[in-house]
Image (cartoon, rainbow, N blue to C red):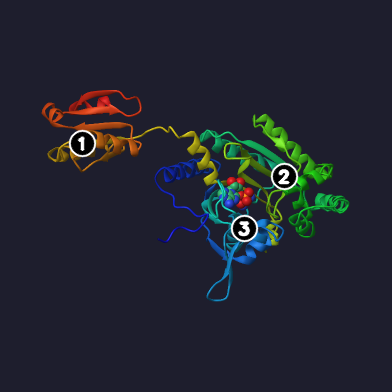
Amino acid sequence: MISALKGMKDLYDEEARLYERVIKTCESVAKNYGFSFINVPHLEQSSLFKRSVGQSSDIVGKEMYEFTDKANNEVCLRPEGTAGVVRAYIEHKFDKSSPIKKWYYHGSMFRYERPQKGRLREFHQFGVESFGVQSVYEDISLIMMLVNIFDKLEIKTKLKINSLGCPECIKTFKEKLISFLNSKQGFCEDCLRRKELNPIRVLDCKQEHCQTLLKNCPTIRENLCSSCKIDFELLCEQLKAQGVEFIIDDRLVRGLDYYSKTAFEFESDEIGAKSAVAGGGRYDLLIESLGGKSGFGIGFAIGIERLMEILKQKETCSKREGIYLCALDEIYIKDLLNIANKLRKTHKVLLSYEAKKLAKHLNQADTNKLEIFLCMGENEAKNQSLFYKNLQTKEEKNILISNLKEEL
Ligand code: HAM
């Protein structure tokens, strides 16, 4: 038997239903914020991610599905969505013609990580990217959009925010950080690599030992220039005014190199130790560094499987929906077809074409998570009625076919 690759999953039944629900919710909220759909390729030139996500990131350093195609091009399955969308923004000259553009996207991303709960090698994201808006109010809007999505899905999250500053503040901070890092010994190999490539990413190390060494490390926040400071204060003030709870996390630097100024992550305790369900931030410098006209960009991405994992736990005794319509004898199936056609104008109906024993039908309805069970046997056929059972409440009765519409 040929099985799916490690860390890659088929999506069907209950999970497929959850997937659709999450995407529909995200889409409807994104549209209300003025975002429209964009689809970009799954395969891009490797250099796109090397130049954007950055050499110091684990994604580029260790996790890319990279290969040489038949024409000797270095290509890569996208590990994230932002770089491709920025490429499309520049390639179609929006940076020059109409810089304000708001797009959302969803689909597969690929990272060669160690598979575990909530961590796959092919996973799905819903993301948004907003171009051409400098105002920090856009940062607030994007965070509110995520709050809205999580509210609609009834998922509890914790918001962490930070400012990564602009090139001016980062220059001062980097100097202080490097001298601090040089004064300590014992950082892990990854940190030593990051120290050379992008020292700020050392702050992101998950190793306890490195986090202990980082105690009393200078923070970006203490080194923000006046403009970044004003923006960050406004961000905090407005989030509070909107009733959004958050914590400022000086160690939040995100795992990708392209961010500046606002960075944020939404965590949930419901899928193991503090997993990020969404993350994002500003990347004003990325457009120019990928060859576009200098501009402004901010976005986020939600990990769909992580949200689904939370929803699955909440829905183990999930709500049933729809009608199971069946017969104990084949001769009644024609009548049922007629009833099903009428009911399907307003209800989801699963019609069984096979005559079976009552218990077998009940079992089938249960497996399909249907709410209402309707069955025709000899007695019911005589009375022009159906046996009714509500599989949620367990209520049982007989309903006249002529009264079906009113009774359901
Ligand atoms: P990211 O933080 O790398 O950001 O990923 C966003 C979300 O994708 C994470 O919070 C997590 O929920 C999910 N995720 C990441 N890796 C995996 C995995 N291996 N398995 C399952 N879920 C995963 C980005 O990708 C940026 N492009 C976000 C962004 C958009 N920033 C600006 N615009």
Label 2 residue SS: loop
Label 3 vs label 2, nearer the camera: 2
Q: Which residue is mark 1?
A: 357
Q: Are marks 3 and 1 in contact (CB under 8 Å)?
A: no
Ligand 1 within 8 Å of disc 3? The answer is: yes
Q: CA distance from mark 3 to mark 1?
A: 57 Å
Mark 2: few, some, or many residues within 10 Å (few <14, many ≥20)? some
Q: Residue 85's x, y, as percent?
A: 58, 57
Task: Please report the residue visible at 79 percent of the width from the left and 43 percent of the height from the top.
Answer: 212
Mark 1: few, some, or many residues within 10 Å (few <14, many ≥20)? few
Q: Nearer the viewer, residue 165 or 323?
A: 323
- Residue 83: which disc? 3
Q: Quadrant of the C terminus?
A: top left
Q: Residue 173's x, y, as percent?
A: 83, 49
Q: Nearer the viewer, residue 336 or 241?
A: 336
Q: Which residue is mark 2?
A: 252
Left or right of 365 in this view: 203: right
Q: Amino acid at mark 2?
A: Leu
Q: Are marks 2 and 1 in contact (CB under 8 Å)?
A: no
Q: Is residue 279 visible?
A: yes
Label 3 vs label 1, nearer the camera: 1
